[in-house]
Each structure stands twice: as structure tokens, then as C-alpha cells.
Amino acid sequence: MTQKAIIPANYRMLISEESIQNRLKEIGAQIAAEFKGKHPILVGVLNGGVIVLADLIRYIDIDLEVDFIRISSYGDEKESSGHIKILKPLSADIKGRAVIIVEDIVDSGLSIQFLRNMLEAYGPSELKFATLLNKPSKNRVDLSIDYIGFDIDDKYVVGYGLDDKQFKRNLRSIYACE
């Protein structure tokens, strides 16, 4: 099955579907080893993180729970505004639980910092962060991300959950828009 019909000419493949799956498999094995017997809650950050979370949990061979949170710092823009709103709070009680937040991309780091500060107040036993993509050159805060799929340059990227004005999330690879 090909997606050529929905890939614009100005998109250049940055990370293939195969590379993404191989890296998620490695991260899944690492999480399974580190959290054996702990039954962690993996929290997907909507909307883009749902694709990463869905594939990642299939590579984690321990019992786990899944929840979602939705925040917004972009609106319809390509750059984070720095102002973060909670659009959907957590449903699960995370007090005393091991929690792993799963993001699609970290650029400024402000969303991660916001989530860390907010969720630590609920008293999890552990709070870790996973992201498929990290843009170290864009980080504006001191970050501690426990599981990173790929470090990338400062490019606008789409696919595999990352959107272009809410479209292109369904692309199976990650593309740089040029």
C-alpha cells in the first residue's frame, strides 16, 4: 500500500517507517526491563502522541495501563506559543504509580516542563518521559527525557502523528517540509 498520492512534492523523507518501528521496539524492550512488576501507566499526549503510544505499547511485554492527556501550545501554528492549555486532563489516579508520558515531539521543552510540574503534584512514584523526536537545538529549558527515538535538526516535520494544520498525521514515515 502506497501513500504517494498524499505526500506533497515539497516533503522529503526524514525517517522511514521501518526505522521508526525498529527504534520503538528498542524503547519498548527497555521500558519492559525497567518497569517489570510495576504496571506503569503510559500517558499519550494527544493528538500526535496517540500514534507513537499505540505502536510503542505493542513492544512492551509487561502489564501496563494507558491514559491520555491533551494540551495545546501550538494552536494552528508551526511554532509553540509558550502558552499551554489543558484540553483533556488525565482520567487515571497516578498517586504512587509509575508514569511514562509519551510525546510525538519535543522542541522548546515547555510542554514537557509544564507536564512535569503539573503531574509531580499528583504524587507518582516515578515520572518519566518518552518522545519519538527531540529537537535539542530548540530546547529552551533544561530537559530530562528518558527515552528518545531520534534527535533531529530544527526542521518542520510531519507524519506519524505529527500534523500540518491537522492533516498528514496518517503518513507512516516522518517527512521534513521544504
Image (cartoon, rainbow, N blue to C red):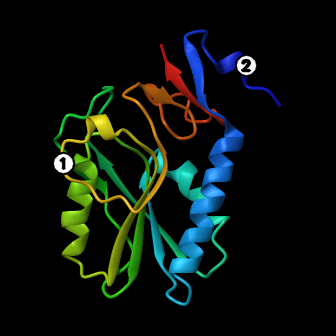
Q: Estimate how packed mark 1 is, as few (under 14), some (14 to 19) or many (20 or more) residues with alpha carbons within 10 Å.
A: few
Q: Which residue is identified by label 2?
A: 4
In the foreground, 121 or 87? 121
In the figure, 45 relative to 101: above or below? Answer: above
Q: Picture coordinates of residue 138 (x, y %)? A: 27, 35
Mark 1–mark 2 contact, CB under 8 Å? no
Q: Residue at x 33, y 26 (%)?
A: 78
Q: Residue at x 67, y 50 (%)?
A: 21
Specify the quadrant of the image occupied by residue 133: top left
> Residue at the spot x=18%, y=65% of the render?
117
Q: Amino acid at mark 1?
A: Val
**Residue depicted at x 52% and y 28%:** 167
Kind of residue at disc 2: Lys
* Residue 64 sits in quarter: bottom right
**C-alpha span from label 1 to label 2:** 38 Å
* Along the line of sight, the residue nearer the viewer: 171 or 136: 136
Residue 23's x, y, as percent? 61, 52
Q: Earlier in the sequence, mark 1 or mark 2?
A: 2
Q: Percent from the top left, x then y, of residue 83?
A: 16, 42
Which of the 4 image quarters holds residue 1? top right
On the image, the x and y values in percent for residue 143 come to 26, 55
Q: Secondary structure at mark 2?
A: helix
Provide the residue designation for mark 1: 141
